Amino acid sequence: MADEITISVNPKIYTLDCIYSAAYILMEKAYFILDGDPEKEVIVKIIPKDAEQIGQQSGLKADDIEKLFFEEMLNYKHYHMNLEKNKEITRLIIEKALFTANPAIIEDAKQIEIKEIVEEIKKESRLEGHSGSEEMNEKIKQIKQDDKA
Amino acid sequence: MMEIMVNGLTEEEISLSKKFYPADCVDRAMIDFSGVCVIKMNESKNYYHIRMTDKSVAREFCNYALSLAKMKRVI
């Protein structure tokens, strides 16, 4: 049976998602067992598969798999960082694509927004204790005119 | 992972941490592997202790449970 290795990973540097993804990628080359504390120290036990199991003449050593594992973790860390950085842009692009496909969504969204603003103004006027509804009506009219324009 | 002798036969016991392997993933893996080899499961405070008759199947079980846990996190 091939050798095995136990490594320690700091979850503050490599998140659990990175660890899971790296292990998942290398699953055809080795067996992985996770242990430890997900918040302080993750212990990864790596047991390389035999050459016969992976259908090759010579299997990888535990050290080689360890290097590959760290490489994959770094790769996923980079991917997740970029994903987080571009989250807002991605959201905007998807929103725009959806709105282009069905413009009625924009009208619905506008109507909902107007309703929300009107409700907010009504609430505010109640809290401030305005008795006159003329001021409020003027504000609502103004919002509706702005929307038409 | 450790070998245990039961009635003259060796059994492989694997311990999976509950912090990394959610209960539903282990259950799913148990159901899927139930036809492959005999499984007995014990549960302690922090670990699932799973006994299997074959060492390499036990290790494959670990990988399978890990892949289910990974998929659960992603989705």
Image: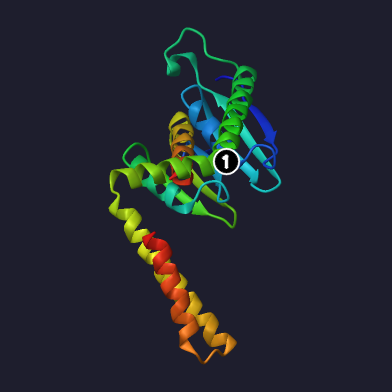
Query: Residue placed farthest to the bottom in the image?
Result: A131
Using the image as rendered, state which of residue A2 and residue A23 is in the foreground: A23
Q: Which type of secondary structure does the marked residue at label 1 adopt?
A: helix
At 69% from the left and 38% from the top, the residue drawn is: A13
> Does residue A81 appear left or right of residue A113 in this picture?
right
Q: Compared to A59, does B18 lie above or below?
A: below
At 59% from the left and 41% from the top, the residue drawn is: A16
Specify how the rendered protein is coloured: rainbow
Q: Compared to A4, does A80 lie above or below?
A: below
Using the image as rendered, state which of residue A132 and residue A48 is in the foreground: A132
Using the image as rendered, state which of residue A19 and residue A60 is in the foreground: A19
> Does residue A70 appear left or right of residue A130 in this picture?
right
Q: Is residue B32 visible?
A: yes
Q: Quadrant of the N terminus of chain A?
A: top right
Using the image as rendered, state which of residue A15 and residue A123 is in the foreground: A123
Badge 1 amino acid: Glu
**Residue at numbered disc 1:** A84
Where residue A135 sits in the image (x, y, percent)? 50, 82
Q: Can residue B51 be seen in this view?
A: no
The 10 Å Cα crowd at callout 1, few under 14, some 14 to 19, many 20 or more, is few
Where residue B28 sits in the image (x, y, percent)? 38, 47
Name which quarter of the figure residue A72 lies in: top right
At 41% from the left and 73% from the top, the residue drawn is: A141
At 70% from the left and 39% from the top, the residue drawn is: A10
Specify the subunit that label 1 lies on: A
Where residue B11 sits in the image (x, y, percent)? 48, 37
Where residue A119 sits in the image (x, y, percent)? 45, 76
Q: In which quarter of the image is the C terminus of chain A?
A: bottom left
